[in-house]
Amino acid sequence: EVEETLKRIQSHKGVIGTMVVNAEGIPIRTTLDNSTTVQYAGLLHQLTMKARSTVRDIDPQNDLTFLRIRSKKHEIMVAPDKEYLLIVIQNPCE
Amino acid sequence: MEIVYVYVKKRSEFGKQCNFSDRQAELHIDIPPNPELAEQFMERNPVDTGIQCSTSMSEHEANTERFEMETRGVNHVEGGWPKDVNPLELEQTIRFRKKVEKDENYINTIMQLGLIMEHCVKQNNAIDIYQEYFDDEDAVEVTEEAPSAKTINVFRDPQEIKRSATHLSWHPDGNRKLAVAYSCLNFQRAPEGMSHDSYIWDLGEGRTGSGRDSRREGPGQEGWEEPSSPLVTLEYNPKDSHVLLGGCYNGQIACWDTRKGSLVAELSTIEFSHRDPVYGTIWLQSKTGTECFSASTDGQVMWWDIRKLSEPTEVVIMDITRKEQLQNALGAISLEFESTLPTKFMVGTEQGIVISCNRKAKTQAEKIVCTFPGHHGPVYALQRNPFYPKNFLTVGDWTARIWSEESRESSIMWTKYHMAYLSDGAWSPVRPAVFFTTKMDGTLDIWDFVFKQCDPALSLKIFERETRREKILEARHREMRLKEKGKAEGREEEPREEEVSINLEELVAKAEEEFFNVIYSEMKRKETEALRKPTEVRAWGGARMGGGKAWH
């Protein structure tokens, strides 16, 4: 079912790429090329950590559930977890 | 002082063993204390000495060798592969990946994250959530035009003895018909032979039609039976537009059906009616649509069912001491009922207090919920704001006040004290902060509280126009009289009349035509007397809300 889920996400309109990265930065699953993936993985991992610590600093009971970065060209969505990160890059239709 | 003791030892005895022996103590030197020495010293008493009881410590500094640090970014080229996996070897990496994918934790996690992610992806696809929905510039509505009002129609009492219009009620369906109650409210000063009729005016087709063109019908007009007493108030039934309720000057309640024609449908019996003129009548929201209630200055509020007007269904005495004593009761001058709050109603009294009552209370005493004091004179008008029912407007003495139900000590907003007594007020049904007030000097003020609080947004003088018209009518009349007598002086009057007419051309044209009719019928009577009476009564009538005039 993991396959199905990832395939389904990838098939949505506007989705450029999907990747699953583990806590060490190793891309488990990716639809983009390796170097891009690794770059995304490393950078987004740090950012997610920072975001999570920010949320928890403000309210210790709170936790980060989702992270959305909207840029001019596209939107990067990160769904964090203890061990893994699910990253999707989408081009939202305007 | 040197103390010396000399002992002698032979040379030959050097090095000889010492034999110790005991002997008695010998006093060698004795030094007695010398008091003279004491004089060199001074006794000090007390003696201060500092002592400290703590651990003795010492201070010491040390500096470690500095450790150089530098912030640098690291560019990951390849992920943090565990030691046993060689990143360059494809096989190993694939194997590692497969292993991770088999992990149960991985599967669960991905399912969960996948759900969240999908939601957001779909959201993005659905609409652009970051779109600018409102333009940056604030569109401030600035009305260029100054507020203004225009007379559309004038309806004048067709009777010879002019009465004041005391109450107006618009037809509930379209705003075409207007029921007007005429009476003379000055106590026992109603002139002899004054008609008791009241009328329903139809505004006719054109909006600029003069009052003369409109048809009028009503109780006491052409086959309608005249009521025994003039009507102080008149109300259309909001549910059934053919039924009208009227409150009489003598305290009775009367009911008409326009379909049935002339006869008064029902009239309440004198014994059970009010003892003073009925100042307020309002229809109630009920399933049958036949319930109404009335209030009067005798201090009672009565509920009626129009099918049986012989007796009121309920009577409440406006006694704020809650003892139901009629002597202590306050006379009711205005009545207010909002169909959205069906169990509550409010009564404005002659003493300046507004009483809020609950209809559904069990005992008479509990009917009166609270009072709102604040006016110095009778509360002539009382109305809830149609948009915010918790706030209501009262008009009395020289001010108009806005109240909130929550604050019972005083009103929340009030206008400044005017020069003339305020006679009536009403909220605008379309704009929440606009209300109208009328004054005894003949001005109609339109207040817009959103725009300006200290002054009315627009102030219109009705009275002045009336006096002008009187002057025009006088001038015209004199002119006609003189023309009839065929004197040349009539021409002198004309230029004067033309001067005035430059200002109010429309009104003159209207007034002319109307006046021709009046002149011909009044030719034989004393004209000056006839003119003076309408001036008086109409002046007072002009100040009542919509008295003699209809505003759109």
Image (spheres, helix red, strand yellow):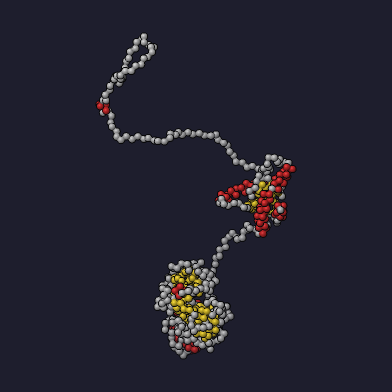
Q: Quadrant of the C terminus of chain A?
A: bottom right
Residue B34 lies, with reference to residue B320, above or below; the image says: above
Residue B83 lies left or right of residue B520; in this view the side is: right
Residue B115 lies, with reference to residue B33, above or below; the image says: below
Residue B496: percent from the left, percent from the top? 47, 81
Q: Residue B290 sits in which quadrant?
A: bottom right
Residue B209: percent from the left, percent from the top? 56, 80
Taking the image as drawn, is residue B312 in sight?
Answer: yes
Residue B334: percent from the left, percent from the top? 46, 76
Q: Residue B56 sits in which quadrant?
A: top left
Mark count: 0
Residue B478 lies, with reference to residue B366, above or below; the image says: below
**Which residue extends farthest front?**
B22
Residue at position x 42%, y 84% in the image: B188
Residue B30 lies, with reference to residue A41, above or below; the image says: above
Taking the image as drawn, is residue B538 in sight?
Answer: no
**Which residue extends farthest left?**
B36
Residue at position x 53%, y 85% in the image: B265
Along the line of sight, the residue nearer the viewer: B134 or B328: B328
Residue B171 lies left or right of residue B295; in this view the side is: right
**Which residue extends farthest right?**
B91
Along the line of sight, the residue nearer the viewer: B482 or B254: B254
**Which residue extends farthest top?**
B12
